[in-house]
Image (cartoon, helix red, strand yellow):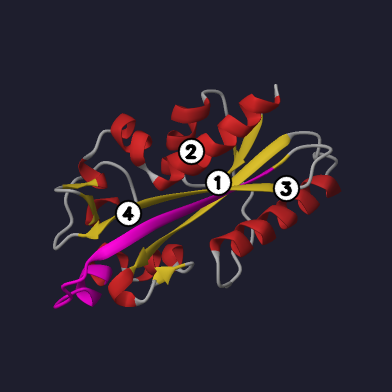
């Protein structure tokens, strides 16, 4: 059984669609200001592992995931600051930043960190390339989904099954699942 460290119900739902049984562990961890998602995830996993070890609970498989939206015209912003930007200015703020921009290319990136007893943490990555739309569309998903388009459709318009076939988070989690399946 894998424990997924997240307070985000949307992330948890996506992960359950891939892994099936999964236990949500909402313990929170520090998301440092770093240059890469890998650094943020590695630091978070070390903190989580240390806290669990202190409670005598590092006897289980644990994963966490960090993701970011990287917009070409904004030189990769919001990137590792995506959660903060979403909380403060939201989708409407990002759309305002994009006013007058012709290059709307963007990439969602995801990093999953995983640890279990007896192994060092391992990381898996996934990406989804698309563009920032001119308007928010759809009420499915969460976060930047309504403004991130793949073709003519936003992630906010997609059913979770379709989104899970193409998303950055699904790619990183499928990479972990494949690695785990290959070890059995």
Sequence-wise first label, 3 or 4: 3
Element type at mark 2: helix
Q: Position of residue 54 (x, y in %)?
A: 85, 49
**Magenta segment:** 94-114
Q: Residue at x 70, y 27 (%)?
A: 183
Marks 4 and 2, how far apart in space? Answer: 22 Å
Which quarter of the rendering shows the C terminus?
A: top right
Mark closer to the chain start, 2 or 1: 1
Disc nearest the viewer among 4 and 2: 4
Q: Residues within 10 Å of mark 3 (few under 14, many from 20)?
A: some
Of labels 3 and 4, the one closer to you: 4
Q: Kindly identify which numbered label has been placed on residue 12.
A: 2
Residue to which mark 3 is pinned = 121
As helix, strand or loop, the secondary structure at mark 3 comes to: loop
Circles 2, 3 touching at the beta carbon (< 8 Å)? no
Q: Quadrant of residue 44?
A: bottom right
Magenta stretch containing residue 101, yes or no? yes
């Amino acid at each position: 059984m894998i424990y997924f460290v997240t307070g985000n119900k949307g992330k948890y739902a996506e992960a359950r669609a891939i892994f099936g049984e999964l236990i949500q562990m909402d313990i929170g961890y520090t998301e440092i200001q770093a240059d890469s998602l890998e650094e943020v995830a590695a630091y978070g996993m070390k903190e989580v592992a240390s806290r669990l070890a202190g409670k005598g609970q590092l006897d289980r498989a644990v994963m966490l995931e960090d993701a970011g939206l990287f917009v070409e015209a904004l030189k990769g912003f919001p990137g590792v600051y995506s959660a903060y930007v979403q909380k403060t200015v939201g989708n409407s703020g990002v759309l305002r930043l994009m006013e007058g921009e012709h290059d709307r290319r963007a990439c969602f990136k995801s990093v999953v960190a995983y640890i279990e007893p007896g192994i060092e943490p391992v990381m898996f990555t996934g990406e989804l390339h698309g563009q920032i739309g001119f308007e928010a569309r759809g009420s499915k998903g969460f976060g930047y989904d309504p403004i991130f388009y793949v073709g003519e459709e936003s992630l906010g318009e997609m059913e979770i099954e379709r989104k899970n076939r193409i998303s950055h988070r699904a790619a990183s989690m499928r990479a972990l699942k494949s690695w785990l399946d290959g070890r059995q």
